[in-house]
Image (cartoon, grey):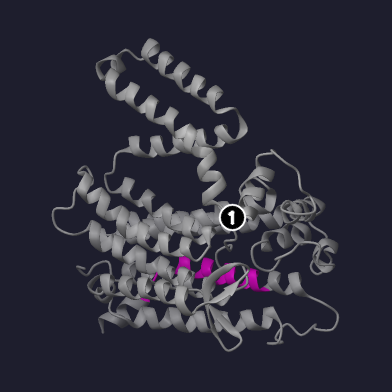
Amino acid sequence: MRNKKGIYNIDKVSIILFFVLVFLGWINIYAAVYNEDHKNIFDISQRYGKQLIWIGASIILGFIILMIDAKFFSTFSYLIYGIGIISLLAVLLVGKEIAGSRSWFQIGSFGIQPAEFAKFATNLALAKFLTSRDVNLKKFKFIFKALVIIGIPSFLILLQHDMGSALVYTVFILVLYREGLSGSILIIGVITAMIFIFTLLLNKFIVIGIIAAITFLIFIFFKNTRKNILPVIGLSILMSVFTFSVDYAFENALEHHQKKRINVLLGIEKDLHGAGYNVNQSKIAIGSGGLTGKGFLKGTQTKYNFVPEQSTDFIFSTVGEEWGFWGCSTVIILLLSLMIRIIKLAERQRSAFARIYGYGLASVLFFHFLINIGMTIGITPVIGIPLPFFSYGGSSLWAFTILLFIFLKLDAARLDVL
């Protein structure tokens, strides 16, 4: 009886946004791969036909999740996480290598990517840990344990040579700040990223000079820092030393195509026929759409396959060309509305477990949203991650559906004690 009541209490706004996004994604996948020989939108031999099967399966999957007792997800969080880790290990041994990444289980003509499903497993485990007794994120040992939960799947995915999916997991760190982690750590992380970028753009000794100048100005204008002179100087020295490791990390930790894409993004080199080709064609497609777009199935960049991976990573360029600025704005508003709705629901939870899980879900959606759309307009590196509920692919659609519907189930049962 409680499960049925939970279904009735499900947030209808989130469900409507889910169906609208999935439907618009399906329509744009059809437009991205449309050709005169295959006009039937229900043709399962084509990507849009297969996506329709994934959509139907995801709806069934969502309904099944809503039928499960909400306490199940809290009780078996670590077990689900363990299964996720085992799947990431298994794919390294028996997975199929696609585009240089060994991250797929091939089942007949279909591929399953464990890295996508491990997201909700990691989210559950992190929520479970942070709601454990005596956990205090002001103590290093608890911060370290939380980072281990996040880091294990990320590391295993890196071993699969799939940096894009591995980077997604780092966004779970944002959840820690909602639960009490000091913001100074986030600031240090942002500064470190800025130093990495500036060291690639400038001579390392110039960057060290900038660090020294900023440290000096901090002591001049912020008198309170004089009481903590040693930590500030120590941090400046560490950052200076870090600049010397940037070149080594860039040359040895990244694949050749990843280095090319970063160099193109930062303007260090131009390669419109190589690493920069996808982004350049995507920008042309989006720009040519103008205010209202060229019309459904009338995009020339789309129709003549100028944009590679247009039904997956670059699906947003189809929206830009055929639906224009208004179409792009609509998709962005819908995705932002879903994320804002999730945060609002997370804040009304009586259960800390459900709240933390909700923030994890919103963080993952935001990272995919920001990076994917950023890729298509050339402001973020091309790291090959899908647009939530929009891009072609069963693994990503199912994973996002599971992520969302677990939270909707937790929210629907929020009056129960987890």
Q: Is residue 161 left or right of residue 68?
A: right
Quadrant of the rendered image containing residue 235? top left
* Above or below 275: residue 16: below
Q: Using a 10 Å C-alpha cutoff, classify the residue at mark 1 as few (fewer than 14 neighbours), some (14 to 19) or many (20 or more).
A: few
Who's the residue at 35% across and 15% down the image?
222
Residue positioned most to the bottom: 108
* Above or below 234: residue 359: below
Q: Which residues are magenta?
A: 8-26
Residue 285 in the image: state x and y as whole percent. 79, 56
> Which is more toward the observer, 102 or 19?
102
Residue 375 in the image: state x and y as whole percent. 64, 52
Q: Amino acid at mark 1?
A: Glu
Give SS at disc 1: loop
* Above or below 358: residue 35: below
Residue 35 in the magenta stretch? The answer is: no
Residue positioned most to the left: 134
Who's the residue at 45% across and 77% down the image?
93
Residue 103 in the image: state x and y as whole percent. 51, 71
Assign the C terminus to one quadrant of the image. bottom left
Q: Is residue 337 left or right of residue 63?
A: right
Who's the residue at 37% across and 50% down the image?
173
- From this viewpoint, is residue 373 visible? no
Q: Main secondary structure of the magenta part?
A: helix
Who's the residue at 52% across and 58% down the image?
163
Residue 263 in the image: state x and y as whole percent. 66, 43
Please give the residue where the numbered disc 1 appears in the rendered image: 255
> Which is more toward the observer, 284 or 381?
381
* Above or below 373: residue 198: above
> Which is more toward the observer, 239 or 63?
239
Quadrant of the rendered image containing residue 277? bottom right
Q: Is residue 146 left or right of residue 396?
A: left
